[in-house]
Image: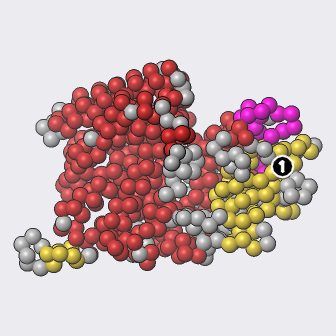
Amino acid sequence: MSDYQYPINDIVFSLLSVARIDRLSPYLDEPMDRDLLDAILGEAGKLAEQVIAPINSSGDKEGSRVEHGQVYEAKGFKEAFKAYSDGGWIGLSGDPEYGGQGLPSFIATAVNEGVQSANLAFSLCPLLSLGAIEAISLHANDALKTQYLPKMLSGEWAGTMNLTEPAAGSDLAAIACKAIPDGDAFRIKGQKIYITWGDHQMSNNIIHLVLARLPGAPEGVKGISLFIVPKFLLDANGEPAERNDVQVVSVEHKMGINASPTCVMSFGDNEGALGYLVGQQNEGIKAMFTMMNNARQGVGLQGLAISERAYQQALAYAKERKQGMKADRSGRAAIIEHPDVLRMLMMMKSQIDAMRSLVYVAAVENDLSHFASGDQKQQAVSRTALYTPIVKGWITEQAQEVTSLAIQVHGGMGFIEETGVAQHARDARILPIYEGTNGIQAIDLIGRKLHSDGGKEMLALLAEIETELAQWQAPDMVDYAEKVRVVLEEAKAATQSCLLAMEKDPVLGTGSAYPYMMLMGYLIGAWLQMRALHEANASKDLEQAQKESWQHSVLFYCDHLLPRVFSFAHEIKFGASTVDKLNKNAFNR
């Protein structure tokens, strides 16, 4: 099994040249130049490679266990989490007032790519903590912030997100968990399922963010409130003391991410778990969406990260594995010399390059949405919202293909668990499902993001792509810029078709949501690939071998992946009526 290597050069290039982090310079006390990025990310890479990656396979085999209502994680995870926390990594972009370092979030994104590639199951714990931290930062009162944020930003305490119930999956309107007023606090009673890292021994306390209903609350999502429910109640000094009325009923036996305990949580089996209101009553869904949007971009990053890990392993294997003869019959060939293996490897690499560009472009846009002001802030807020379902949906779909190709490159050995490559595919399979299935992401894109503003923000993005394409007239780019431009016209037509369909019927119109999300993902990927090629060709820092690698990646993407847009455009143009006619009777036997 190959060792993981943090791809610092690709990450830094994406940040500087594609995501253009210099757009944030007016808002930062210290400019983020190459030297500073190398210093921070170099240390993060060492943590990922040397501490977190080595326990990936062993954690998958061991999993977690429940004893006396508590979860015990796989060996080595507690020590790895301590190293991660002691390094200050969880507080990188946190508010300095509460112990955070105040760095832009794209830095945390770049750090977390390494953590997630190294060990996806491990990375879910800090991911959920970061989402909880952001929700508390933006919506809780000052007293709760002061009480909880410093210990969460230091990593002494972890955080979770408790939405799903046995009868309320993606439909949060059906939530039945109750919150009964008790003085200044509330007694929480109910059950939550699929709670990632709902319990463990890696931190001194676990801060659950729980959706529940107050007595007399309005029905549906308008009657949901959000509560902090700590595993351990705090004493007068703010330290964990008495155990709260929160228990783990069981952990799920899953297809992948086996070292991440997915818990069934019971709140209030006895007197009721003490909880504290975050934000206003009946406005919990607003605060929870802060966590969900944070997590959705995080899951897109996971798709990139697990793809990178699978690609590295496939590339290493292809260089080592001898199969068949060399073209000149002079001896046995490494399989990387065979054209079909080269095709599969570049299919992986070119998608990963596009995925990484989108992840970091979206991360920088998210930072602008927090740092900027006025019109620029509003533009960044809108663009971040537009990117989020594509980051989550399109990238995690790509991860299914990339991790599957990694197995294919290994041949029969890929189907054997001992090689470790199958774990990446098993782990990746959850990504299109949790934090809102990709069907929900697609509906969010076509409904809340496209239809709600009449296509204004999407058309602005398409216009930006068109303007940039027109600038790329160098001999080695002009032909491929034209290929992207042709696809752009398909995207414009598909956008108008979707707007008309949603205007006609906002329910039936969502039948085109998935192909529209995928179409936009491939188009944006091509746009950013072309930007990467332009920047690589102009760079004085990249070696010639790196420039040639980018050329191969971008041109392969445009010839082999970008044409998929035509298929999705055909679905939107001609296939909507067949979807509209479907009902349960279509599946009678």
Q: Residue at x 46, y 24 (%)?
A: 501
Q: Where is residue 520 in the image (x, y as percent from the top left)?
A: 39, 36
140 or 454, nearer to the observer: 454
411 or 66, nearer to the observer: 411
Residue 165 vs residue 58: left or right? right
Vertical arrangement, residue 251 with respect to residue 582, above or below: below
Residue 203, image quadrant:
bottom right
Q: What number of labels is visible?
A: 1
Q: Name the residue under label 1.
A: 188
Q: Residue at x 21, y 52 (%)?
A: 552
Q: Position of residue 310 (x, y in %)?
A: 39, 63
Instruction: Residue type at mark 1: give it.
Output: Ile
Residue 394 visible, this angle:
yes
Residue 401, image quadrant:
bottom left
Which corner quadrant holds the N terminus? bottom left
Q: Residue at x 18, y 66 (%)?
A: 338
Q: Which residue is drawn at 33% across and 33% down?
A: 570
Element on which disc 1 rests: strand
Magenta residues span 213-229
Vertical arrangement, residue 486 with respect to residue 294, above or below: above
Q: What colour-coding does the image apply?
A: secondary structure
Residue 226 is a magenta residue: yes
Residue 58 is a magenta residue: no
239 or 326, nearer to the observer: 326
Q: Where is residue 147 in the image (x, y as percent from the top left)?
A: 77, 50
Q: How crowded is mark 1: few (under 14 residues within 10 Å), some or many (20 or more)?
A: many
Residue 344 vs residue 573: left or right? left
Q: Position of residue 69 (x, y in %)?
A: 78, 68
Vertical arrangement, residue 552 with respect to residue 498, above or below: below
Residue 308 visible, this angle:
no
405 or 378, nearer to the observer: 405
